[in-house]
Image (cartoon, rainbow, N blue to C red):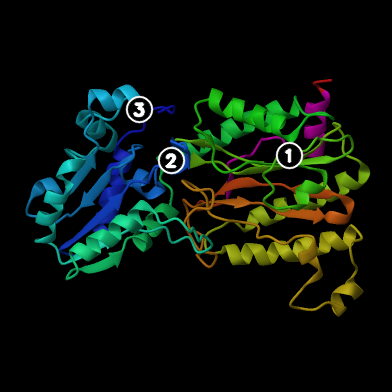
Amino acid sequence: MRYQPISNNLYKKNRKDFSSQMEQQSAAIFFSNDQCPRNGDQFHPYRQSSDFFYLTGIEQEKSILILAPQSPNENLREALFILKSNPILETWEGHKYTPEEARKISGIENVFVLDDFEAYLKELMTYVHQVYLNANEYIKFFPEVESRETRLGKKIQKNYPLHHYKRAAPLLTRQRLIKSKEEIELIKKACQITNDAFRRVLNFTKPGKMEYEVEAEITHEFIRQGATGHGYAPIIASGKSACALHYTENDKACKKGDLLLMDFGAEYANYTADMSRTIPVSGRFTDRQKACYNAVLRVMKEVKKLYVPGNTINDINEATNKLMEEEMIGLGLFNKEDIQKQDPSQPLFKKYFMHGTSHFMGLDVHDVGAKHEPLKPGMVLTCEPGIYITEEHLGIRIENDILITDGQPVDLMAGFPIEVEEIEALMQAKL
């Protein structure tokens, strides 16, 4: 692993907290992610299931976790199953965990080889009445490919049809919503690496550079500092491309006079940052670009005040929409009379600001949690208002990551270049 070792106390606590939510005479079974085929005999780079990593710290494929707190066999109260390595496997694929290494990383004493799983599972199922199985329940995600936890979960249900099965996801969601001190420090590290990459880009960007060259500068800084890479596909969008919200081709030239919208975040120890910035390719904003940029920035500064316990993402979105509507009037995009005549189901501001302002983040860039969830200390969310004026080939998004506390919100990206004057000064310094 590229990141600094993490104390296994984090994973011990996560398992303890999960087990405390389980019903009596229950077991929970978690599976690591699949290796995903790419083409030919190649796999995509491996990324562990966020839930599996949260409970174990284990990064290796073909791993299984059992939690059965009331099992009479103490070996099964916490049990980890990993690949049985051998010289031939390691010659071709590199080092695999030894049981001792897996114990040290996870804090799980009972580490077995994967070949023993079926025998231990059969014993376990004679003790328990219900079984918790996990699944990705993100409401906007509809993959066509079945995950390993779904596939093997179905196999268990088929082989043991007389047990009761329960969902692990709601229990894990409650836990993962509130970040521990250790998790917050990892997110801060990801944010700092992201800031360094942004400053690098400010010294690099100029007319004629390709979007993918800017992406390469970001990736270089991420890898150089021990991040595994990007927490999500980076958006490096110049000119009109910035009006496509999830533009990721990153293959256009950065032209003189255009703005460059960048949405990217380093992934460090599987925790991601999420930052958006918009800069002038030529090093200076035009008057119109500056007016639009500062309109978005004013909204961001005002909306950040709402990141306090008790509010919800829905509350934040509603407030942002009202503020953005006022700014759009000031920018001449429509007037108050137009608003009075608008179709309430298709408000005018939606043409220029069509996405939400906030989402939870952590192990996933769009982390677990719902829009109606009241904010609580320890939650981390994004704040990302924007404006997109397609006819002017102008798209602006500004985004920071915010920690909810008992008092005022903490901007985890405070001090990162964001003001027009800061950005222009840093870009001009390279000339």
N-term mark: 1 or 2: 2
What mark, if any, has residue 429 been given in the picture?
Answer: none
Residue lying at 44% horizontally and 27% vertically, measured from the top left: 2
Mark 3 touching mark 2, by CB under 8 A? no
Q: Is residue 254 left or right of residue 30?
A: right
SS under mark 2: loop
Q: Which mark is residue 418?
A: 1
- The verdict on residue 425 being magenta is yes
Secondary structure type for disc 1:
loop
Q: Residue at x 35, y 27 (%)?
A: 93
Q: 61 left or right of 372?
A: left
Q: CA distance from mark 3 to mark 2?
A: 16 Å
Q: Quadrant of residue 385?
A: bottom right
**Which amino acid lies under the numbered mark 3 shown in the image of this protein?**
Glu
Image quarter (top left, top right, bottom left or bottom right) of the N terminus: top left
Q: Which mark is residue 47?
A: 2
Whichever of labels 3 and 2 marks the residue nearer the N terminus, that label is 2
Q: Is residue 414 above or below residue 26?
A: above
Task: Give the image location of residue 403, x and y in percent.
Answer: 54, 48
Give, as a single range, the part of the protein colored magenta: 409-428
Residue receiving disc 3: 93
Q: Residue at x 82, y 63 (%)?
A: 326
Q: Is residue 327 above or below residue 58?
A: below
Between 283 and 63, which is closer to the camera in this rendering?
63
Tag 3: Cα neighbours inside 10 Å, few (<14), some, or many (≥20)?
few
